[in-house]
Image (tube, rainbow, N blue to C red):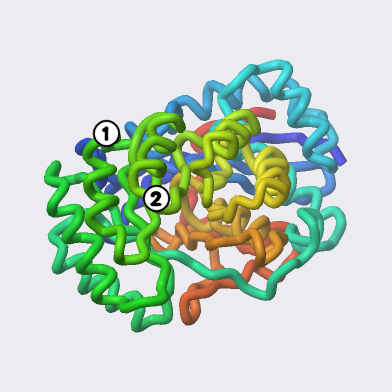
Amino acid sequence: MKITRIALWHVPLTSHETYYMAGGKTCATTSSVILRLDTDTGLSGWGEVCPIPHYLPAYAGGVAPAVAEMAPLLLGADPVGPEALMARLDRHLIGHPYAKSAIDIALWDLTAQAAGLPLFALLGGRAVADMPLYHSLTCVEPGEMARMAREAQGAGMTQFQVKLGASGDWQVDVERLARVREAVGPGPLVYGDWNCGSDTLTASRVGRAVADLDIMLEQPCPTIAECAAVRDATRLPMKLDETAHDISSLLEGARAGCMDAVALKLSKFGGLSATRRARDLCLHLGARMCIEDTWGGDITTAALLHLAAATPASGLMNTCDLAHYVGPALARDTPKRHKGRIAPPEGTGLGIAVDHDRLGPPDLCHD
């Protein structure tokens, strides 16, 4: 099998409600880059990457030039066995993991289709029937966040990510966490996420104020050292996100004692190949994992669900149905949340049917 063509689309994805985060960050409409690798056998593999503006060193406009740089190595290459080809791409173009993520996902899709297997079978085998989801609550007025949490709980959700810091008032963040905890009651997992938008003093004050409420904190500050200081000051469990992006950062978080949980996002690591290696390290380190991506639609959601399904339940804290939060839908018959859980697609490869009519003609092709 040989890759004969690379096609790219830029698709605006609109969140069903604007997400407000610390530091003035918002997420309403983002540009998702869809990639398709065609082969001489008639099989095609799909990938997707959707960077959030002002979130990480990645932007949608950088994907196409990076793919153009890697196109000569991709065209004519055998896609089966993604890691060998990805290693060649890494030697040719250092960095740019977000652009490589879409390619890597498409290569895994092709490899699994060629094997006639669902993708999770190649990522370690199906370890769980379905996976727990978390529900993300945009940072708005505390009472409204509590209402949204109750609504999601009524649909079966048991894990809640509470966005913090948008108002710049630490006492309002305390109220957000307290109101959500009161709304969902004891038992469900509740964690407050600053998306790097706090300092150690502010995050420590919030954490100490809610210390009796069974709360976890997520990425309050921009560095692992600062997050470790907040964990030490509050004695609350800590989840790393933005600072966890490669093997070195995972080891640093473990050494600092502030990686009770960690978000493994495909586009931060560079796709399924690198994220699978990160997953296996986290299983060894004992860190609970949220397997997800920065943002995106049906394609990246399918990819992350396959990796989550191949992860032992003992290491999987939760996963995310990103496509649930945005429109338009880009594929048919995709997995949907059910009572707070979700199962991976069952078909070969990614197991989804991308809607060509909704995509229209490609924006860019290499052949």
Amino acid type of the residue tagged 1 in the rendering: Asp
For label 2, the crowd category at 10 Å Cα-Cα, with few meaning under 14, some 14 to 19 and many 20 or more, is some
Separation of marks 2 and 1 at Cα, in angstroms? 17 Å
In this view, the residue in front, 163 or 332, is 163
> Which image quarter holds the N terminus?
top right
Quadrant assignment, res 216: bottom left
Q: Residue at x 49, y 51 (%)?
A: 359
Q: Which mark is residue 155?
A: none
Q: Which residue is mark 2?
A: 235
For label 1, the crowd category at 10 Å Cα-Cα, with few meaning under 14, some 14 to 19 and many 20 or more, is some
Q: Residue at x 40, y 42 (%)?
A: 232
Q: Residue at x 65, y 33 (%)?
A: 247
Q: From the top left corner, tell me how far across and down residue 40 is, in percent.
A: 82, 42
Q: From the top left corner, tell me how far across and down residue 99 is, in percent.
A: 56, 31
Q: Helix, strand or loop at disc 1? A: loop
Q: Residue at x 67, y 46 (%)?
A: 285
Q: Nearer the viewer, mark 2 or mark 1?
A: 2
Q: Tell me, yes or no, if residue 164 can be seen here.
A: yes
Q: Which residue is mark 1?
A: 199
Q: Answer whether labels 2 and 1 touch (C-beta < 8 Å).
A: no
Relative height, residue 255 to residue 351 (above, below): above
Amino acid type of the residue tagged 2 in the rendering: Arg
> Which image quarter holds the C terminus?
top right
In this view, the residue in front, 207 or 67, is 207
Q: From the top left corner, tell me how far across and down residue 34 is, in percent.
A: 53, 43
In this view, the residue in front, 125 or 34, is 125
Relative height, residue 301 to residue 202 (above, below): below
